[in-house]
Amino acid sequence: MTAYDTQTILHNNGRTEYGLFQINNKLWCKDKHIRQSRNICNISCEKFLDDDLTDDMMCAKKILDSEGIDYWLAHKPLCSEKLEQWLCEEL
């Protein structure tokens, strides 16, 4: 069984990405490290670090609707381009 770490934080090119969906603080959520976040999901980035994925999924859906699946570049080589299939290889 694969374990997923909802408390993952990744520092990437001046941005911080939070949680299971790696949602960044420059556009999608607000944190204390960056003052000028657009905070499109209208949520604190720290909310993406708990085990309740409800708010994470709502923001990820907003990103998907706005940017498409290619927003998550790391997933592109692993996942089918047909979103309805969601066929991903195990790492």
Image (cartoon, rainbow, N blue to C red):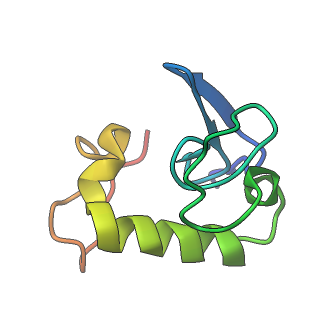
Q: Would residue 49 appear left or right of 61 to someone viewing this image?
A: right
Along the viewing direction, whichever of 72 and 39 lies nearer the viewer: 39
Q: Residue 85: give x, y in percent of width and height.
A: 24, 75
Q: Residue 87: give x, y in percent of width and height.
A: 29, 64
Q: Residue 22: give x, y in percent of width and height.
A: 56, 46
Q: Is residue 68 above or below residue 37?
A: below
Q: Would residue 6 appear left or right of 80 to someone viewing this image?
A: right
Quadrant of the image containing the C terminus: top left
Pick out the residue farthest to the left.
81
Task: Name the quadrant containing residue 64.
Answer: bottom left
Q: Is residue 54 above or below residue 44?
A: below
Q: Would residue 12 appear left or right of 82 to someone viewing this image?
A: right
Q: Is residue 48 above or below residue 37?
A: below
Q: Is residue 24 above or below residue 68?
A: above
From where the camera sits, is residue 87 visible?
no
From where the camera sits, is residue 9 visible?
yes
Pick out the residue farthest to the top.
13
Residue at (55, 21) in percent of width and height: 14
Residue at (55, 55) in percent of width and height: 28
Quadrant of the image containing the N terminus: bottom right
Q: Residue 90: give x, y in percent of width and height.
A: 42, 47
Q: Would residue 50 appear left or right of 24 to someone viewing this image?
A: right
Task: Name the quadrant containing residue 84.
Answer: bottom left
